Image: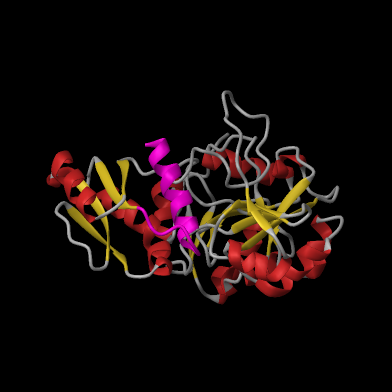
Amino acid sequence: MDFVGTTERLQETAGGITRAAEILRQGGTVALPTETVYGLGANALNPKAVVRIFAAKERPEWDPLIVHVADEAMLRLVVREIPSAALRLMEAFWPGPLTLLLPKSDAVPDLVTAGRSLVGVRMPRHPVMLQVIREAGVPVAAPSANRFGRTSPTSAAHVLEDLEGRIDAVLDGGATEVGVESTVVDPCQTPIVVYRPGAVTLQMLEQTAGPAVRYEPPAMTQKPESLPSPGVGIRHYAPRARVVLVRDQAELQARVASLGPERTGVLLPAGWTSGGQIFDWGRTPEEMAQRLFAGLRDLDSRGVTSIVCPLPPEHGVGAALLDRLRKAARVS
């Protein structure tokens, strides 16, 4: 596929939003800010536009996309039915960082869902993204706006590092708020299945809609025909440097010393000490989530060969951090 050559830079203004919506209506691709990460948007109902997402990202067609909607009418256009558990979750967490897997309508191309009968759909909280969808008048398919397998983008500059010249435009809405991708759940099953952890935690889901369990992927010995949900592939979130996970302060310092401080980056939580090239990772799990991908990209840009990162506690949004870090380390 031929690419555009030059990516148009749009600002967070009425004119920029209108231009982004126009490009989407015309079948183009626009990187858009959401509260989670930047997404690469295209008209979800236009198969030719959706193909351009896969081509720009070099994303395999067995990995499904998430469709973003701005209102109930648009939701009803892309799904056939909404179970009661899904309605409770929408009332509690939409607009917000929660994707629901629901029976897809015939209007949604099979390419969007990798041939599956369920489509991932969410209503984003970011006011710019919502306004673009409203003005475009179409649901917007939007996976993270990066090359497949790479670190997700939390700023317009990150998008351009990966996709300059491969997409029509990027709409600069500043740094994202949450910093990790949306929670993905299937509310059609009992208990609810959590395919990807995020800012809407397992505990929050259970308080709203009853029992929930984490998805346990089968061992993949060959290329899958399709994945059951966005965000469950093992090839995700990886910087160029090798990611090394450690349990505590002593292991962190030993790793940095053994790898060589000059070529080693460290995602350093507040209150920890270390040699190497430091990125201030923050104090709370929420801060650490917001800064995770920016930190991996920053340390990569300094030319380090390894990035050492402490494992966060496995509760709340810490589960989302662990998911991203373990996948990044596995790919590395």
Looking at the image, is 296 positioned above or below residue 91?
above
Residue 332 spot, x, y in % from top left: 37, 37
Residue 127 spot, x, y in % from top left: 59, 74
- Report whether 154 appears left or right of 52: left
The structure residue drawn at horizontal position 23% and vertical position 48%, both measured from the top left corner, is 251
Residue 31 spot, x, y in % from top left: 53, 56
Residue range (magenta)? 311-332
Residue 310 lies within the magenta run = no
Residue 156 spot, x, y in % from top left: 43, 60
Q: How many marks?
A: 0
The N terminus, quarter of image: top right
- Report whether 263 appears left or right of 300: left
Magenta stretch, main secondary structure, is helix
Pick the front one: 151 or 10 = 151
Residue 68: which quarter of the image? bottom right
The structure residue drawn at horizontal position 50% and vertical position 44%, both measured from the top left corner, is 166
Pick the front one: 171 or 192 = 192
Question: What scheme was used to colour the molecule?
Answer: secondary structure
Pick the front one: 313 or 47 = 313
- Report whether 187 appears left or right of 220: right
Q: Which residue lies furthest to the top in this view?
A: 222
Pick the front one: 15 or 72 = 72
Say if residue 288 shows up in the picture: yes
Looking at the image, is 163 positioned above or below residue 321?
above
Say if residue 74 shows up in the picture: no
- Report whether 119 appears left or right of 321: right
